[in-house]
Image: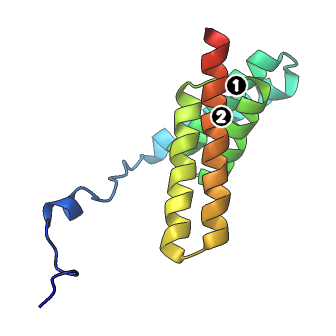
């Protein structure tokens, strides 16, 4: 009688296809890990905030490539603490937060959803601050 639960547009579901992850070879992984090691050494000897922000961002992006999500988030957040920007690190961090939020939603964890939504809101505030500074 009522068709509330019928699928009206089956094409909509196909838009939510899972992401295809690119698998890395062992030599690529070794190369990325070596780059991370070099960046960490540079971080230990750097005092300049802008340079530190760049080094943390590069490190976080490399951890993203290795799919080490929590460590990537840590380094990308450190980058933004030293210098607010809306570059590649910002985009990657927003994407990681969104994935964490989606995982929390899938597991039904309301507290975790709120946590990651708040993180995403703080990122939007950074974008506003950076945009205002440019004007």
Image quarter in which the C terminus is found: top right
Above or below, 14 against 61 in this view is: below
Please tell me how crowded label 2 is: few (under 14), some (14-19), or many (20+) other residues with Cα within 10 Å.
few
Disc marking residue 125: 2
The residue shown at (81%, 19%) is 49
Choose between 124 and 88: the one closer to the eye: 124
- In this rendering, the count of numbered labels is 2
Disc 1 residue crowd, few under 14, some 14–19, many 20+, Cα 10 Å: some
User: Residue 114, which numbered label?
Assistant: none
Residue 125 showing in the rendered view: yes
- Which mark is drawn over residue 84? 1
Secondary structure, mark 1, is: loop
Q: Is residue 48 left or right of residue 50?
A: right
Q: Quadrant of residue 60?
A: top right
Which residue is outermost to the front?
1
The residue positioned 52% from the left and 52% from the top of the image is 98
- Percent coordinates x, y for residue 91 in the rendering: 52, 34
Q: Position of residue 76 (x, y in %)?
A: 67, 37
Q: Residue at coordinates 50% horizontally, 45% vertically from top-left?
A: 95
């Amino acid at each position: 009688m009522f068709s509330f639960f019928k699928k009206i547009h089956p094409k909509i579901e196909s838009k939510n296809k899972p992401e295809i992850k690119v698998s890395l070879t062992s030599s690529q992984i070794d190369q990325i890990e070596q780059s991370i090691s070099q960046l960490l050494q540079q971080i230990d000897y750097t005092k300049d905030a802008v340079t530190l922000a760049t080094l943390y961002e590069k490190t976080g992006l490399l951890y993203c490539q290795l799919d080490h999500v929590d460590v990537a988030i840590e380094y990308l957040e450190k980058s933004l603490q030293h210098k607010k920007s809306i570059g590649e690190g910002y985009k990657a961090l927003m994407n990681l937060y969104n994935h964490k939020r989606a995982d929390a939603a899938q597991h039904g964890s309301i507290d975790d959803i709120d946590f990651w939504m708040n993180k995403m809101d703080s990122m939007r505030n950074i974008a506003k601050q950076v945009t205002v500074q440019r004007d």
